[in-house]
Amino acid sequence: MPSQLSLPRGVRPSPVPFRSAPSRWVALAGLALLSGAGPVSEAAPVRAKVASTTSVPPAAAAPGPLRAETLALLSQPTGASEAVWRKLGPEVVPVLAALAEDTSVPDAQRMRAVTALGRVETPEAGQTLQAMLEDPRRPSAVRSQAAAALGQRLGFEAVKTLQARLKDRDLRIREAVAQALGRLGGQQVREVLEERLPLEDVPQVREALQQGLTLAEP
């Protein structure tokens, strides 16, 4: 048996008062006020308000003067010269990429935006065109234009990237890639097209491969 505290004879121990749940809550609230944390009932709403404020994404930046200047250049039927795009520098690359995907922009200007990427002499332009070509979620017209622009931008460095797309599921991409390779010319391109020709079943693409071989002739 555990030892108990001895009391004088005739004295009964006083019962420990039982605190109800509301009483304990009031006590906790008092401790919180004394510690400077504020009322317990108000702490949770304050934290929730702060969390909701920080989770709101920042507002999108308004179009700048570079976008307006780029749209003006793309509105020219003949397109701006390579010297003009080179002068704008790498800052124009994301602008052209965004315009190429903006469905509110006329299709002709969107295609010129893709072509213009091939005239910007920065690594970012080539990387952007490659991403456009390899993304199956993009419209076929944009990807086809990207194939031609990539060949123009990278030259023979684009052969491996274009060669991989000769197996693309979209026959329009295979056709555009065959033509882009043909415009590059050279023995390496001829070997790539000759290797692919017997494996292609679609007459439309086979014809593009044949045209590519004709263009690639020395």
Image: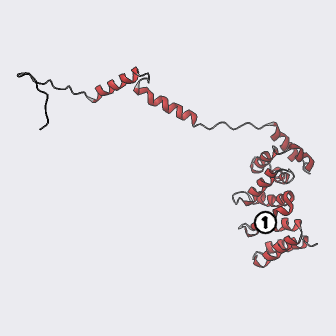
Q: Position of residue 112 (x, y in %)?
A: 84, 52
Mark yes or no: residue 75 visible: no
Q: Secondary structure at mark 1?
A: helix
Q: Is residue 38 above or below residue 172?
A: above
Towards the viewer: 115 or 193: 193
For the C terminus, which image quadrant? Answer: bottom right
Question: How far across and how far down the image is residue 33, in percent?
Answer: 40, 21
- The figure's colour scheme reads secondary structure
Is residue 45 visible in the rendered image? The answer is yes
Label 1 amino acid?
Answer: Lys
Q: Residue at x 53, y 34 (%)?
A: 51
In the image, 194 versus 28, the foreground residue is 28
Between 218 and 211, the one lying in front of the other is: 218
Q: What residue would you read off at disc 1? A: 160
* x 86%, y 47%: residue: 74
Asked which quadrant contains residue 27, the reply is top left
The part of the image, by quadrant, that contains residue 41 is: top left
Percent across and percent down for residue 99 are 78, 47
Q: Residue at x 86, y 73 (%)?
A: 190
